[in-house]
Image: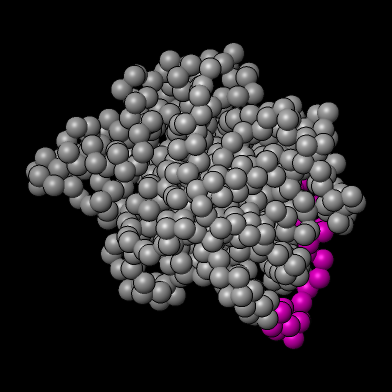
Amino acid sequence: MRRKIEPPAWQHVAATRRSLIESKIPPEWRVPAELLKSKDLVDLPRRCRIMTEQELSITELSAVEIVSLIQAGKISAVDTTKAFCKRAAIAHQATNCLAEIHFDEALLQAGQLDEYMRVHGRPKGMLHGLPISVKEHIKIKNTTATSGLIAWADHVSDEDALIVRTFREQGAVFYVKTTNPQTLMAIETDSNLFGRTVNPHNTNLTCGGSTGGEGALLAMRGSVLGIGTDIGGSIRVPSAFNGVYGFKPSIGRIPHSGLSGLSDGMQNIVGVVGPLALSLEDIELFCIAALKNNPWKYEPALLDIPWKEEVDVPKKLKIGVMWSDGVVQPHPPITRALKQVVVELQNQGHTVIDWDSQLHHSIFDVTNEAYFLDGGAEYHQTLEEGHEPPVPIVKWLLDEKAKHRYTIEESWRVNRDLDNLRTKYALQWNNHDVDAIICPANASVASVHNENRYWGYTCVWNALDYPAVIFPVSTVQGTDIWKNFPPLAAPLNPMDAWSRNLYIDSEGPLRYEGAPISLQVVGRRLQGERVLCITKRVVDILKSKECATPRD
């Protein structure tokens, strides 16, 4: 009788993967240990003196500026790629944000692009020479796509995801893949395979999830443009927590085929691919490039809707402001940011009305049902296959949100409920005829690790299929206390009580020190171009106020 050979312990699999990542960082790019002790590591790339001034300057440009300079022959693809490789290596040492490193391959690809430009006298495409980072579960040929699961640690992709192939055809350079959490279904980026990714603004805080590695990397400018995915807030929460821009399009706008993940084939709530970026102009560049080669010819689920570079938006906007979703009240920093934006919009003559959130609780409840129709069976099975335990946030998720396996008839009821709520929400929008809704991206700024359990401010828009943009507003201040922004007299429910207790006036501002405060602009289904345009208007108003404010 043959002896059964047990698979390697998950600890060994994880240690091997982490060692491989570390081995790809050249010794001369190693950050001295004493420089990693600070909580705020955003400016580490300058402090560590590993990068040249030219490299720092390149990585502090926008994606639009970079491609323009490369196409004009003022900087090379190789110099640009090397600069971002260095900065990404520094960011990883600070935050543990990288899942795969391909510096050598990227520099080779960049050299080929420089040669293409020399021979042909023109760029290969609109992204020629631009380094782009990619969330780990998005497939790149000959790299792994594990979704943070030990059982999938050796799953090597045999082809590019369509978004990767499209960008490669446009001349993009792929140099790193970034961390996502175990199972992907969490707004904290933590896994047994890669470990925990932290927030560079304050390493005691989470970077969010599930596109958390991208959020941390962009916050440190180790990337200027990243590819993420979003099925419940996975682009928007990391964007908000790390103070960068993020965009969740409607389903069927951006190529989505070629991803690894559990619940593959689920149609109740469908995920989307979208960008994390350092400017709204870079988000637009991403969307234009993504649709440049008519990807609906290769992915039948995509809609044949080219990206509109000009949209009609009224000079004076009508904005609905949702102060709370009626489930979990926002913490004081979020409320202050909302008040600030409302005042500035009104000062510029825009109409602002209070948005009624009465449907949100029902949508949130039904959305959570739709996520786990199998009662979490596939999650449990895949964790068991890898002989690994769930990390704390995933354990809580499976214990609290995936208790019941639905019958076919029950799943039909979930679908009916979702459709009915979508209709009610559309009618509410019709009745008030707003141009957009501005609301929190989360009840909290970036939370302490394992403390963020509520995603209602983002997942509702997935259920409704409304496009949404994240934009940064401010950072936590000492005056951000409940006393200055009082909540309702009593908690709305146990989750609201839990959330309130995380922000105590005597500790809150210090506990969340340095955390960015971001908000969310939401538009109607398939109107991504319009919601981006409106967000630009809001951001421009805030920036003009910033410039007009005297500084000490």
Q: Position of residue 367 (x, y in %)?
A: 70, 68
Q: In which quadrant of the rendered view does residue 397 lie?
A: bottom right
Q: Residue furthest bottom?
A: 409
Residue found at x 82% / y 33% = 505
User: Which stretch did the figure color magenta?
Assistant: 389-417
Foreground of the two, 128 or 546: 546
| Quarter containing the N terminus | bottom right
Q: Is residue 154 above or below residue 461?
A: above
Q: Position of residue 59 (x, y in %)?
A: 37, 31
Magenta stretch encompasses residue 35: no
Q: Position of residue 311 (x, y in %)?
A: 36, 63
Q: Is residue 423 above or below residue 42?
A: below
Q: In which quadrant of the rendered view does residue 416 lie?
A: bottom right
Foreground of the two, 241 or 77: 241
Residue found at x 44% / y 50% = 536
How many numbered tags mark residues here? 0
Note whether residue 515 is visible. yes
Residue found at x 55% / y 41% = 472
Magenta stretch encompasses residue 398: yes
Note whether residue 523 is visible. no
The answer to whether residue 2 is left or right of residue 222 is right
The answer to whether residue 550 is left or right of residue 5 is left
Foreground of the two, 486 or 423: 486
Q: Position of residue 227 (x, y in %)?
A: 45, 51
The answer to whether residue 469 is left or right of residue 59 is right
Q: Main secondary structure of the magenta part?
A: helix
Q: In which quadrant of the rendered view does residue 455 lie?
A: bottom right
Residue found at x 32% / y 35% = 81
Q: Is residue 137 above or below residue 56?
A: below
